[in-house]
Amino acid sequence: NYTLEIPVVNLGGGGEDCNTILGRNGAFPFTVEVPFVIPENREPVNVRFTDSVGNKVTPLIQNDAGTNPVVIAGIEGTLSIDGIRREYMFTRLEPGEKVNVEKGDAIVTSASTQYKDYISIIFIGTYGGFSSEADLISKINAIRLNRDFNKDRYIVIGIFDRADGVWIDKEHLETRMLSEFGDHYINLRSYLMSDALKDAGISPTSSDQSRLSSNEIPYSLLASKNSAELNATSYKLLGGVVYDRMESLGYFDEVVNELGIKDTRKELQAVGKYRPRG
């Protein structure tokens, strides 16, 4: 009997748009917008930045999500946000010589360097940050290709409801995503409106039935009415769907073959571990 721990690192940042996520990932790194000086001591200093192509980015809105520690001009430190003024501050970890930081210098995040050989589970777009279907697909590809290994081992989870600030034709987008990513793509919206309630053992309420008839996600699967977030039950179901898809794509084959395991559903456990940084 084997129990195997497969590390799952949660790098989801609540409320972040695509540009912020790609910045943390390192595909389009956070980039200094205005020159500044890192002082000799550990005094926090204001830092203004965009992504590498000039898009506004807003990390640390709800959680760190693999941002810290960061490296700027060779100096390791932490990035923080003043929630009232919505300004970002950089604090070096150790005192040292004063350093001039130039416009265009990269802000290297923890997430952009630590997980270069991991399999990517890409779930972006709900909070906008893309201009078109083609732009969203391009940004998904940028994330998966920003790996040293496993560029072709990835999962893409589709937008299940809406995208902030962007009008989308859901069915047309889903067709494009399936065409682009094939079996790597999970149509989350379709699953939530078909098998999810049954899989969760939930009897649909009258409101659920009404929403299903209107081609909308049942309230029983959402964090709250009209929420852009799923509830705990839905996320647990999604974890199972992702696991099954990874298994069907052969992502566990090396382990299975090495140990002679025949029934991965019973004998191989994917254990999720959230590893907060900073």
Image (spheres, rainbow, N blue to C red):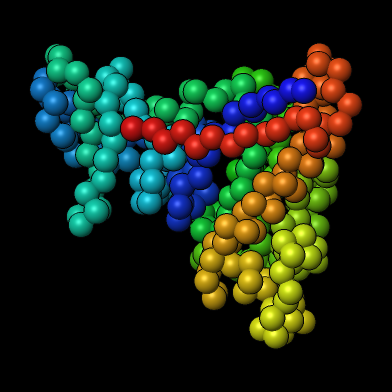
Name the image quarter holding the N terminus: top right
Q: Where on the picture, by quarter, is residue 145?
A: top right
Q: Nearer the viewer, residue 197 or 93?
A: 197
Q: Residue at x 77, y 36 (%)?
A: 246
Q: Residue at the location (78% across, 27% down)?
A: 252
Q: Outermost residue, front direction?
A: 1
Q: Residue at x 52, y 71 (%)?
A: 224
Residue 246 in sight from this viewpoint: yes
Residue displayed at 69% across by 81% down: 205
Q: Is residue 191 visible?
A: no
Residue 203 in which image quadrant: bottom right
Percent position of residue 165, x then y: 51, 66
Q: x, y percentage for residue 213? A: 77, 82
66 left or right of 259 in image? left
Residue 139 placement (x, y as % from top left): 60, 43
Query: Residue 82 vs residue 199: left or right?
Result: left
Residue 60 sits above or below residue 223 on the image: above
Tell me where residue 242 sits by quadrant: top right
Could you tell me which quadrant the C terminus lies in? top left
Left/right placement of residue 64 relative to residue 135 reads left
Q: Position of residue 209 (x, y in %)?
A: 74, 81
Which residue is nearer to you in this view: 271 or 47?
271
Does residue 125 appear to the left or right of 46 in the view shown? right
Q: How many numbered marks does the figure carry?
A: 0
